[in-house]
Image (spheres, rainbow, N blue to C red):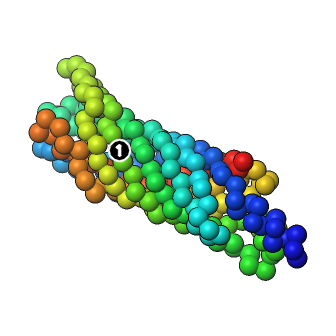
Amino acid sequence: MHFSANHSRKKESKFEFTVNTKLGFAKLKQTGNVPLNGNVNGADVLFTLPLGSKWNLASGIGYLEYDANPSIAGNTASIKNSYLHIPVQFSSDFAIFNNEKPENQKIFFTVGLGVYANSLLKQELETVTGNSSVKNQGWNFGFSSQIGAKFILTDALNIGIGFEGQSDFTKMKKDGNEQKLENLNAVYFKMGFKF
C-alpha cells in the first residue's frame, strides 16, 4: 500500500510534453462579408504542469489554418488564413474504471477549459483575376473546451482522442477590417510524453 501511494505521487509530479493535432470546421466573420464556413486544421505543442492531484495546466504554441471558398462577384474564390495560436488550458483526467487500483488505471475521461491568443500571420485570397495576400492582421482572444479519452500506454507515453471547441470573444482589427473565428469544432488527437 505504501509503495502504491508513492508510485502514484511520482507519476503526478512529472512534466508532460504534448503534441495536439486537430481537424474540423469553423465560421469566419469579417467586416463587409457574410459569415463564411470553412475547414480548419492545426497543431499545438504544449508543456503540462500538474496542479495538485487532479488538475493540470498546459501552455505552449501552435499553428492553425482556415480554408474556405467564398463567391466574389459570381466567381468562386479561395481564402486561406494562417494563425499563430497560443493556448493556456486547464484539464483533468477522471478514471473510467473506479474499481481499479490507481497504478493500474489505463483509460481516462478527459475534460479541459482554456483561453487562447491568436495572431493572423497571413491572409491569402486567390481569385480568377489574381492573387493577393496581407500579413500581420492583428491579435485576438478566445475560449476553448475539450472533452475526450486518454489512454496510458506506458509510464512515459499516452495518447488521447476527443473533441475541441473554440470561439473568439474579441475581434482582430487592422486597417478598418475586423474579423474573428467562431464555432470552431474539431476532432483532436494527442500524444503525450512524460519526463
Please indicate whether residue 38 sits to the left or right of residue 112 in the image.
left
Q: Residue at x 36, y 48 (%)?
A: 117
Residue in the picture at 45% in, 38% down = 63
User: Which amino acid does the dot numbered 1 rest on?
Assistant: Asn
Residue ID for mark 1? 118
96 lies above or below 85: below
Name which quarter of the figure residue 107 lies in. Answer: bottom right
How many numbered discs sit on the rendered protein?
Answer: 1
Extreme residue in the bottom direction: 99
Q: Is residue 139 left or right of residue 195?
A: left
- What residue is shown at x 46% (from left), y 54% (from top)? 88
Q: Residue at x 28, y 43 (%)?
A: 139
Looking at the image, residue 94 sits to the left or right of residue 156; the answer is left
Q: Is residue 103 visible?
A: no
Against 133, is 79 above or below?
A: below
Q: Considering the image in quadrants, where does the N terminus appear? A: bottom right
